[in-house]
């Protein structure tokens, strides 16, 4: 059980982790004592696989929120090193500083040159403090726009990975024009003349996420979330009680399946059984396949057609009625 307590594991994952720990213990004892435990190990593996399938097939929205924030979930750079070749990071917004919460640069995807931009969280306390927990300052969004405009000049498609609780709301960020930086990204991304594809890999929070998300194609990992506010923030506003977060998550319809049904995204990328945090390589392969398909579908479209289709895509989102 010592392995389990090292975490981070979620409560609903613990039965699976306990079985896996038993398997590791049996295999260790067999190798040291020469005992044949193959049959018992196989039985436990089958039991673990079935349990994983059963648990992850009926997750509640709040559980998916927890998975989107999982401490073991692959970060943007974890995925970049598995998906792209020759990634060359570029830095700075040419106005204030480089923002470590945003990574970006030129890369290759199966022989196709492109520009990549994404939010970057840390893996531990120190790196999360340096990355500001993936919450970008205005210079981060200005850096991302600089890279996207560079991609347009070179005729390269843009791929973005979204994983942020939201844009940083601190005093300094507001003084340097956080709202303006996000608004400018929305406007300029809408008018880019090159193909653009976004993937929400973890948290897609508020305008901080949307600032990288006005793209021709938008996809979400199966256990990612996309919302205008966090469940905790929603609960604090509606019920003045952060303890109602699970109820808020259910009401907000923030899961990938909800976003697909609402017409907000173009597809859901299936995660390995047990979640992306348990199989980074499998998650990366799934994302890579979807990116290749999406970019192939945008090949051959001129800049005017891309802009017009993008405009119609966003105009078609949502419903409204007029009352007299």
Image: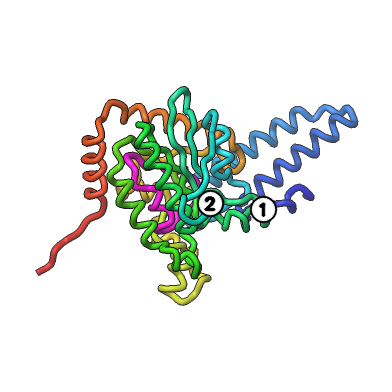
Residue at 51% of width from left, 39% of height from top?
271
User: Which of the image's four quarters has the C terminus?
Assistant: bottom left
For residue 8, side relative to residue 24 (left or right)? left
Along the viewing direction, whichever of 239 and 309 lies nearer the viewer: 309
Camera-side mark, 1 or 2: 2
| Residue 54 point in image, percent of width and height | 54, 43
Q: CA distance from mark 1 to mark 2?
A: 21 Å
Q: Residue furthest right?
A: 33
For residue 24, side relative to residue 235 (left or right)? right
Along the viewing direction, whichever of 171 and 154 lies nearer the viewer: 154
Residue at 68% of width from left, 45% of height from top?
17
Q: Which residue is mark 1?
A: 124
Residue 261 visible in rendering: no
| Residue 210 point in image, percent of width and height | 38, 53
| Residue 19 point in image, percent of width and height | 70, 43
| Residue 316 point in image, percent of width and height | 22, 48
Residue 214 belongs to magenta span: yes
Q: Residue furthest top?
A: 111
Residue 266 visible in rendering: yes
Please provide the residue range marked out in magenta: 201-222
**Tag 2 secondary structure:** loop
Q: Residue furthest bottom?
A: 240
**Tag 1 secondary structure:** loop
Q: Which residue is mark 2?
A: 98
First of labels 1, 2 by sequence position: 2
Along the viewing direction, whichever of 220 and 40 lies nearer the viewer: 220
What colouring does the structure picture have?
rainbow
Residue 206's tag is none
Residue at 70% of width from left, 30% of height from top?
42
Along the viewing direction, whichever of 31 and 215 lies nearer the viewer: 215
């Amino acid at each position: 059980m010592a392995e389990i307590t090292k975490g981070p594991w979620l409560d609903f994952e613990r039965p699976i982790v306990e079985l896996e720990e038993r398997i590791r213990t049996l295999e260790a004892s067999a190798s040291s004592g020469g005992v044949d435990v193959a049959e018992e190990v196989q039985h436990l593996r089958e039991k673990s696989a079935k349990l994983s399938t059963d648990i992850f097939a009926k997750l509640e929205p709040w559980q998916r929120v927890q998975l989107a924030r999982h401490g073991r979930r692959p970060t943007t750079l974890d995925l970049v090193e598995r998906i792209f070749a020759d990634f060359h990071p570029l830095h700075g917004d040419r106005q204030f500083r480089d923002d470590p919460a945003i990574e970006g640069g030129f890369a290759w995807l199966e022989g196709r040159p492109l520009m990549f931009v994404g939010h970057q969280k840390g893996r531990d306390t120190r790196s999360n403090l340096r990355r500001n927990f993936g919450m970008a300052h205005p210079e981060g969004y200005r850096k991302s726009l600089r890279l996207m405009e560079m991609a347009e000049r070179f005729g390269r498609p843009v791929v973005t990975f979204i994983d942020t609780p939201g844009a940083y709301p601190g005093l300094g960020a507001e003084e340097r024009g956080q709202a303006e930086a996000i608004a400018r990204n929305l406007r300029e991304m809408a008018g880019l003349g090159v193909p653009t594809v976004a993937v929400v890999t973890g948290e897609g929070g508020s305008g901080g996420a949307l600032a990288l998300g006005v793209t021709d194609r938008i996809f979400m990992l199966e256990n990612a979330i996309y919302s205008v506010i966090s469940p905790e923030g929603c609960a604090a506003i509606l019920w003045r009680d952060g303890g109602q977060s699970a109820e808020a998550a259910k009401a907000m319809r923030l899961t990938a399946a909800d976003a697909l049904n609402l017409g907000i995204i173009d597809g859901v990328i299936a995660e390995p059984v047990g979640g992306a945090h348990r199989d980074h390589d499998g998650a990366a392969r799934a994302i890579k396949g979807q990116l290749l398909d999406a970019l192939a579908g945008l090949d051959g479209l001129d800049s005017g057609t891309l802009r017009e289709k993008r405009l119609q895509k966003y105009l078609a989102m949502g419903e409204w009625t007029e009352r007299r």
